[in-house]
Image: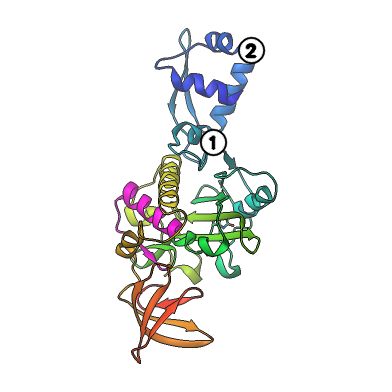
Amino acid sequence: MNEKVFKILQSSKDYISGQEISKKLNVSRQAVWKAINSLKQQGFVIDSVTNKGYKIIDYPKSLNKQVLDNILETEFIGKNMIVLDTIGSTNDYLKVLGHKDGKNGTVAAAREQTAGKGRLGRKWVSEKDENIYFSVLLRPQLSPMEVSGITPVAGLAVCKAIRDYCNIDCKIKWPNDVIVNNKKLVGILTEMSAEFDAVEFIVIGIGINTDQTEFPEEVKSKATSLYLETGKKIDKNKFLSLVLKHLETELTKSNYKINETNLEDYKNLCATIGRKVTCCKGGRKIKGTAINVNTRGELEVESEDNSLITVNSGEVIIQGIY
Ligand code: BTN
């Protein structure tokens, strides 16, 4: 009912009376009134004027399904949009759907996560309405080998969306963090269920620091938010819708890979190339300079003894970046 009343309010240019809405939907005035109150509780500002009716004059600041459904411009990502007030982890939520009949492109976004997960078993602190937390369920018909570049592609898409929406000079810290002024703005955690030669599903979980102003002591010098960088609070719904659009474009364009369609873009936005790095390879610590990202999405490092090393996973410490 809320959705139907929202659609009518949204599509009417001027005030519309409760009576007219109830007639259109063939429901009681009481039911319309209840739906309007529920929309107000979600954060819609709805003006009501005697003898004229109702009109939406402002939208929720927090993530909202009605608003997102209305503004999404994608073909499949987010067509099934789930917005949760609170959840343990949006990745875990979608993994359950992945094992069942969750549709390709389903998005689960949450206003709060109580058990948000970071990479390498770390926590991802996810306070209510402070930042954006969401995951995307994908079912590409590819082998696990063929999707090894999917997280960097997602990083590229989010980096482009932020540059587009906020006009800031953010970059990618190889393989997939998005950074600005050498501090982390976005984290991505990809999880997969697969057989030897076929992916069953992939969940890409993305956390974007939007409004946060204070960080725990241990990450204070390493993390930032869009608000701290720009001094502006963004519209979370509009911004998420743009991120999903970029994600869909980048993933479909490259068929989920780092390849000739996106490698130049990736390299141009990659802050790691040209920096001094320390990486772990076969249990050995190697110092050198990052010189390239290759077509497999691996980082190429020229070591101090002039040998060429490729790195494809694990932690790389980059001088000057957290
Ligand atoms: C990282 O450590 O950099 C990855 C952080 C990923 C956080 C996001 S928030 C939405 C999704 N749900 C989770 O539990 N984690 C990811």
Residue under numbered circle 2: 27
- Which residues, given as a range, are shown in magenta? 153-174
- The extreme bottom residue here reads 305
Label 2, secondary structure: give it.
loop
Which quadrant of the picture is home to ligand 1? bottom right
- Residue at position x 66%, y 47% from top? 97
Count of labels shown? Answer: 2
**Residue 169 colored in magenta in the image:** yes
In the rendered view, tell whether residue 263 sits above or below residue 94. Answer: below
Label 1, secondary structure: give it.
helix
- Residue 132 at x, y percent in the picture: 49, 50
Q: What amino acid is found at the position of numbered circle 1 in the picture?
A: Lys
- Residue 263 at x, y percent in the picture: 35, 62
Residue under numbered circle 1: 65
- Residue at position x 51%, y 23% from top? 7
In terms of sequence position, does the residue under pointer 2 or pointer 1 come before the other? 2
The N terminus: image quadrant? top right
Is residue 147 visible in the rendered image? The answer is yes
Majority SS type along the magenta span: helix
Q: What amino acid is found at the position of numbered circle 2 in the picture?
A: Val
The C terminus: image quadrant? bottom left
- Residue 304 at x, y percent in the picture: 35, 90
